Image: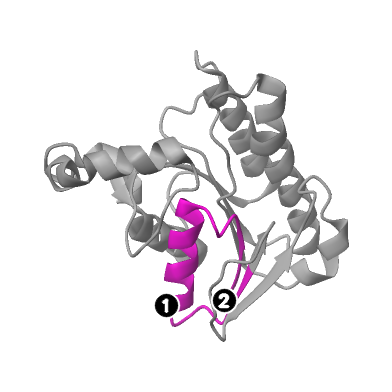
């Protein structure tokens, strides 16, 4: 299996990258990002892209893949709807449309988040729901993954400062959360393995909530 990961330097992407490189049935991983991951591995190839709305400069690099794990994202804090839509809708939809043309049978997983809904009260929830709908419409094997609270494992770290502080402060409580509220908690390694499972065998539902990711 050959896998493309968008956003492999982010916390979720780091988990997806680690699990993909560890998987015996994954023969090649292509990381697409603005900067190198810093990871060295014989399975890993990397390409950099300045504008994620236009993938034509790397089109030839994207052929022949079986799965795409789209982990690229941004916090909605401080962004208006237009700026957030650019990153959370325009970018993943551009990737989905090109990859569907190049690899129509691939599995495409868009990582959104718990609480995503088309009629949500929060702007980010509505934007991500639109992206999920477009991904599912574009790919027969398209999924929207909705993780809840994500525990960073195996050295994964968030690029967002407020999230890093939150994870540091809540670290002692995470084992308790796994026991008392398992439906709402997952980890970067479990999320990465769930992506691989979807690529191998699929899931019963196209929208995969946190409880199912576990």
Residue at image x 63%, y 51%? 140
Residue 92 — which label? none
Residue at the outermost bottom position: 42
| Secondary element type, mark 1 | helix
Residue at image x 58%, y 23%? 78
Residue 210 placement (x, y as % from top left): 35, 42
Q: Which residues are magenta?
A: 1-30
Q: CA distance from mark 2 to mark 1?
A: 13 Å
Q: Within 10 Å of the Cα at label 1, are there few (<14), some (14-19), or many (20+) other Cα atoms?
A: few
- Judging by the rendered image, the residue that carries numbered circle 1 is 22
Find out whether the residues at labels 2 and 1 contact each other: C-beta distance under 8 Å: no
Residue 128 placement (x, y as % from top left): 58, 32
Residue at the outermost right position: 56
Of the pair 174 and 205, the residue shown nearer to us: 174
The answer to whether one can see residue 151 in this image is yes
- Work out whether mark 2 precedes mark 1 in sequence or the reverse, and give the earlier one: 2
| Secondary element type, mark 2 | loop
Q: Within 10 Å of the Cα at label 2, are there few (<14), some (14-19), or many (20+) other Cα atoms?
A: some
Residue at image x 66%, y 21%? 81
Q: Quadrant of residue 149?
A: top left
Of the pair 96 and 8, the residue shown nearer to us: 8
Which of the image's four quarters has the N terminus?
Answer: bottom right
Is residue 46 shown in magenta? Answer: no
Residue 1 — which label? 2
Is residue 2 shown in magenta? Answer: yes
Residue 208 against residue 195 in the figure, above or below: above
Residue at image x 57%, y 19%? 123
Residue 138 placement (x, y as % from top left): 70, 45
């Amino acid at each position: 299996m050959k896998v493309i990961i968008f956003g492999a330097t982010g916390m979720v992407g780091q988990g997806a990258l680690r699990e993909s490189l560890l998987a015996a049935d994954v023969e090649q991983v292509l990381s697409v990002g603005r900067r190198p991951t810093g990871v060295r591995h014989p399975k890993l190839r990397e390409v950099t892209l300045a504008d994620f709305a236009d993938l034509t400069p790397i089109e030839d690099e994207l052929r022949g893949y079986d799965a795409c794990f789209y982990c690229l994202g941004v916090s909605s804090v401080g962004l208006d709807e237009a700026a957030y839509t650019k990153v959370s809708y325009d970018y993943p939809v551009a990737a989905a449309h090109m990859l569907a043309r190049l690899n129509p049978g691939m599995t495409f997983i868009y990582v959104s988040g718990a609480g995503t809904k088309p009629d949500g009260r929060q702007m980010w929830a509505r934007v991500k729901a639109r992206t999920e709908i477009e991904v599912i419409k574009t790919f027969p094997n398209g999924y929207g993954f909705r993780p809840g609270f994500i525990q960073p494992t195996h050295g994964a770290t968030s690029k967002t400062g407020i999230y890093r502080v939150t994870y540091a402060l809540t670290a002692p409580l995470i084992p308790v959360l796994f026991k008392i509220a398992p439906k709402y908690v997952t980890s970067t390694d479990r999320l990465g393995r769930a992506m691989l499972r979807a690529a191998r065998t699929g899931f019963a539902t196209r929208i995969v909530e946190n409880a199912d990711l576990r």
